[in-house]
Amino acid sequence: MPDLAGEPVGADEFASLMAPLGPFESQPRIAVACSGGRDSMALTLLIRDWAAARGGDATALIVDHALRPESAAEAGQVAKWLQSRGIAPRILRRCGPIPSADIQAAARNARYTLMSDWCEANQCLHLAVGHHLDDQAETFLLRLARGSGVDGLAAIAPVSETRTMRIVRPLLRIPGERLARTLAQFDMPDYVEDPSNRDSAFARVRMRRLASTLGREGMTPRRLADTAARMARARAALEDAVAGLLAHAAVLHAAGYCFIQTMPLRAAPREVALRALARVLICIGGRDYPPRLERLERLYAWLFAVDGGRGRTLSGCRVLKRESALLICREPAAATSVLAARDTLDWDNRFRLRLHVRGQSRGEIRRLGNAGWRRAVGDAPALKSTPIPAPARPSLPALWSSSELLAVPHLGYCRQADITVEKISFSPKRPLITARFTLH
């Protein structure tokens, strides 16, 4: 392979970087996360040409985080730069108060939520993000400093799949220096400098400043990224084993609970069993991340204890023993989401609902609760024979109007009202196994 250090990224090389991240449509539509910084501007221009060569198109998503007074003007300026290069920009604005703590994490969550919502609304299956080799090396070091295991040390994944789209990162093998050259090759001198990239209050910036010292000891960004790639291969092998175990042992129900057979769990290697439990907890609990390992290990030990007691709670879930299986369901006290009734909504990071709201009618989606269950059964005693296990019922989504229970879709309970539930699906934030997409 030729030494391309310091060279701009050309069209053929970029096509080779995109190829393993597919499949893509025959005429791909790609959204690009564009902050206006050097890296994302270079990626946006590369994606523009790559998509156009295949009869597709690119849209740049510019997020105004509204954290600095000048952010709106910066977003507008980035949009003008991109429009001058034939790229359609869309500015997405964050609303609400400025976070009081962990501002970077809050900004990241808001950014991905806005971009995900845009992609879903516009039927765009792919979001390209500009993380590059230096980002990968910094992430590896940050995870190493925190004592991460295989998953953490795999660092940034080339492809991440959510319930609605794929996030692709084609530049993970490209150093930042080459992206600067690429931007110059496109004759694009203008980009935004984020002042937080120089603020040593952030751990990532401090790690970046160690790069030259670490490099002299052999820990170059390339070598660190290569190690992360090896960890990613190990993670992928473990994930395959976990998927096989869950396919054999777990039954996921549309009402948002799961039964998992204990014998296959006991027979599986401990690491695979722990990961399988974590995947179920993430899925049922509507979480982004697994519980801490020590808590997961305590749960695993309890599963096979002779005296199991009354069950356990972890990651917003209840875990109960049921003969030869475990029942894992949402912990009612953790299902605190209350959403005003509107056409389409996602409730509790688990359920997607489509409602029909007539006129100015008001209602809200919140958990059924024990009181709601008693009310529903009082109205319709036949509901007592529902196959939904009793521990899972209180956390079911229900339609309320003030204190009046209007509907519980999973129970088939519905009263005449100006708001009706037309469709409901279990659509957790993180699926039980990795999502798969069919492209047309």
Image (cartoon, rainbow, N blue to C red):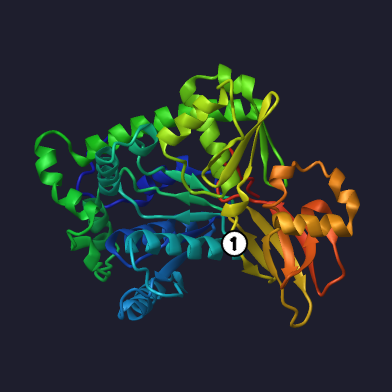
The residue type indicated by label 1 comes to Ser
Q: Residues within 10 Å of mark 1 (few under 14, many from 20)?
A: few
Left or right: residue 52 versus residue 180 is right
Q: Residue at x 28, y 49 (%)?
A: 135
Q: Residue at x 61, y 20 (%)?
A: 264
Q: Position of residue 391 (x, y in %)?
A: 69, 43
Is the residue 8 above or below the residue 58 in the image?
A: above
Left or right: residue 259 versus residue 63 is right
Is the residue 97 above or below the residue 222 in the image?
A: below
13 or 353, nearer to the observer: 353
The answer to which image quadrant residue 369 occupies is bottom right
Left or right: residue 52 versus residue 26 is left
131 or 280, nearer to the observer: 280
291 or 54, nearer to the observer: 291
Q: Which residue is mark 1?
A: 337
Q: Position of residue 353 (x, y in %)?
A: 70, 61
